[in-house]
Amino acid sequence: MSTYLVTGGAGFIGSHLVDLILSKNKKVKVIDDLSVGNLNNLKKHQNNKNFKFKKIDICKVNSKTNFLKDCDKIIHLAGIGDIVPSINFPKKYFKVNLEGTLNLLEYFKNKNIKKFVYAASSSCYGKAKTPTNENAKIENLYPYAMSKYLGEQTCFHWAKVYKIPINSIRIFNAYGPRSKTSGAYGAVMGVFLKQILMNEKLTIVGNGKQKRDFLYVTDVAEAFYKASNTSLTNQKWNLGFGKAYSVNALVKELRYNKKIFIPDRPGEPKITLANNKKIMRDLKWKPKVSFKQGIKIILKNKEYWRNAPLWTKSKIKIATKDWFKYLK
């Protein structure tokens, strides 16, 4: 039986993926440095004989990291995902997203593994035409995008030179329960849910007409699982629902009327929309959870964000000061 390794497995997407793998009675090892991940996301599995966890920083993985031994299907989700702070801390992003990935590739390059699946980002496309397919022009507009793209390119280089069977999935906008509740200013869902809990105004960037391709987290997890089990290799796939919704549409589904508009951010696309035909065809995958269904689920679970940071208009202005300075 294969043993899966999920890096970042205590985090948002990772913990849902661990749920899926264990539901199929497969063995899984999880590593996470817990800087963002939460062990409570994995608590229900602690007595499962097929589950093992260890707190490990991918930046410190080396040939003596014995916990990774015997893993032959690696799904690499660990990394820094917040976009805005990458302007302030680019070296940190490159250390984790590039050097951390390189450490894993070096560890597994002579281990005869079955698959290494890399979690890439659609941010590599910048302001690409939509629907965006896998051959769209690469336009990394900020350090986060570049760090994730270079991690992906390193994976494919190791595939070419060292024959590691690599697949990469470029995630558009994942959402759902267990998204992060700590750290820097980040994804819109968590920001809005905390604001709702505190009866504060929703901070809508620009006019709210910008659109995003939102994909529910269990659909994301299923795509990664399928990518680790396909006979296909050296593939890159765009992963999205294939339909874009505006921030205003999101606010409407949240059924909350208090809102305020804050300055539009330079360097961000007006619309992200995945052409997901390739991943649907290659992996026999398709999204199952609609946008409306997904929003209903997170509203039922909104208490999860009770202890998350509250981002107000003034705090966001401070957090994005350098973003406007460098990307205007």
Image: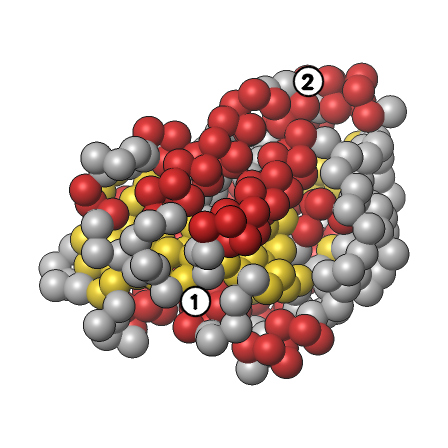
Label 1 belongs to which residue?
228
Q: Nearer the viewer, mark 2 or mark 1?
A: 1
The amino acid sitting under disc 1 is Ser
Task: List x then y, in percent, for residue 34.
Answer: 33, 36
Give the camera-side residue of 173 and 296: 173
Residue under the point 82% across and 25% down? 327
Task: List x then y, in percent, for residue 303.
Answer: 43, 49
Counting residues from the start of the chain, the first of labels 2 and 1 encountered is 1
> Quarter of the image holding residue 287?
bottom right
Residue under the point 50% across and 58% down? 166
The amino acid sitting under disc 2 is Ile
Residue under the point 29% across and 73% down? 23
> Quarter of the image holding residue 175?
bottom right
Residue 134 sits above or below residue 184 on the image: below
Mark 2 and mark 1: span between their CA atoms? Answer: 41 Å
Q: Quadrant of the N terminus?
A: bottom left
